[in-house]
Image (tube, grey):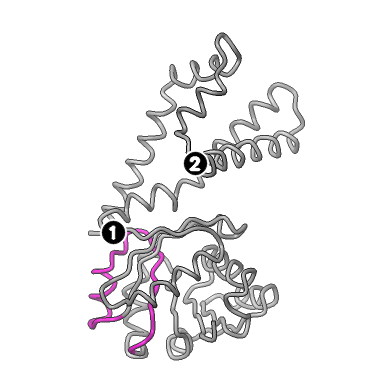
Amino acid sequence: MSKKIGFIGCGNMAKAIIKGVLNSNIFLGEDIIVSDINLEMLEKTKLEMGIEITLDNKVVSKNADYIVLSIKPNMYEKIIQEIKEDIKEKTIVITIAAGITREKAESNFGKKVKLVRVMPNTPALVGEGMSALCPNDMISKEELKEVEDIFNSFGKTEIMEEKYMNAVTALTGSSPAIVYSFIEALADAAVLKGLPRDKAYKLASQAVLGSAKMVLETGRHPGELKDAVCSPGGTTIEAMFSLEKNGFRGVVMESFVKCVDKADEMSK
């Protein structure tokens, strides 16, 4: 792309997206500009990724064709008030914060802007991100394709309606933390049974990665794939019995519901 992309905020998600677009050659370092109040973090990111940096959010808003608001939800109103006069008619604003609806973001601008609400996740850092995109009616098909290309450069995308976005926050945005905890628990159990910790983490992580890939690439129902591993009277069905007896799926579902409820609360 011969356009510039800007990030207001240089946290983990911003760096994940930047790494993704750089690795996929969607943007060059000279086409990326990032602002933040933390100069040390900015300078470190510049050294690592070869991007432009600034302490002034207005420099980003005046020069970028795409502006990613990679800031905490409670900072949105303040930052939008700061940059709203600099947003050009063709500028595409991308929000990535949990609980920030399109309506809430648009009301802070006080005018119609081209806006895409996106819920990405941190596996973007390794090219396996999952991003849900929700454009407003100012975004054309061509512009939406451009935003899709950005987020497809480090994973997969799905176009979603606004009403589903808080559930998506739990399903893709927050779920990596649950998966990491699951991997850690598997590895801890392996260590308990005598495996070296470094090998336990590697084995557990690859098992999770391979299992997810089986679901995606075979198109088979997860329950069907689970059944195929559970031999009659075998070790795996014994493990499944223990999980079910202790409410494994119910606990996972409850954690999801709690996450969505929190996102709903933040959206008000």
Relative horizontal placement of residue 117, taking residue 229 as reference (left or right):
left
Say which amino acid is labelled 2. Ile
The residue sitting at the top extreme is: 233
Q: Please, is residue 36 above or below residue 103 in the view? A: below
227 vs 71, nearest the viewer: 227
Relative horizontal placement of residue 6, taking residue 29 as reference (left or right):
left
Q: Position of residue 18 (x, y in %)?
A: 57, 71
Residue in view at x 43 percent, y 91 percent: 62
17 vs 109, nearest the viewer: 17
Q: Position of residue 135 (x, y in %)?
A: 32, 69
* Distance Cα–Cα, label 2 vs label 1: 25 Å
Q: Circle 2 sits on which residue?
A: 178
SS assignment at label 1? loop
Say which amino acid is labelled 1. Glu
Residue in view at x 38 percent, y 69 percent: 95
* Residue 261 on the magenta segment: no
Residue in view at x 37 percent, y 70 percent: 75
Callout 1 crowding tier (Cα within 10 Å): few <14, some 14–19, many ≥20: few
Q: Quadrant of residue 23?
A: bottom right
Q: Position of residue 173 (x, y in %)?
A: 44, 53
Specify start and end residues of the magenta stretch as a single range: 89-113
Callout 2 crowding tier (Cα within 10 Å): few <14, some 14–19, many ≥20: few
Q: Check the picture and name the quadrant holding the N terminus.
A: bottom right
Q: Please, is residue 219 above or below residue 43 in the view? A: above
Q: Circle 1 sits on which residue?
A: 161
* Residue 108 on the magenta segment: yes
Q: Please, is residue 245 above or below residue 140 in the view? A: above
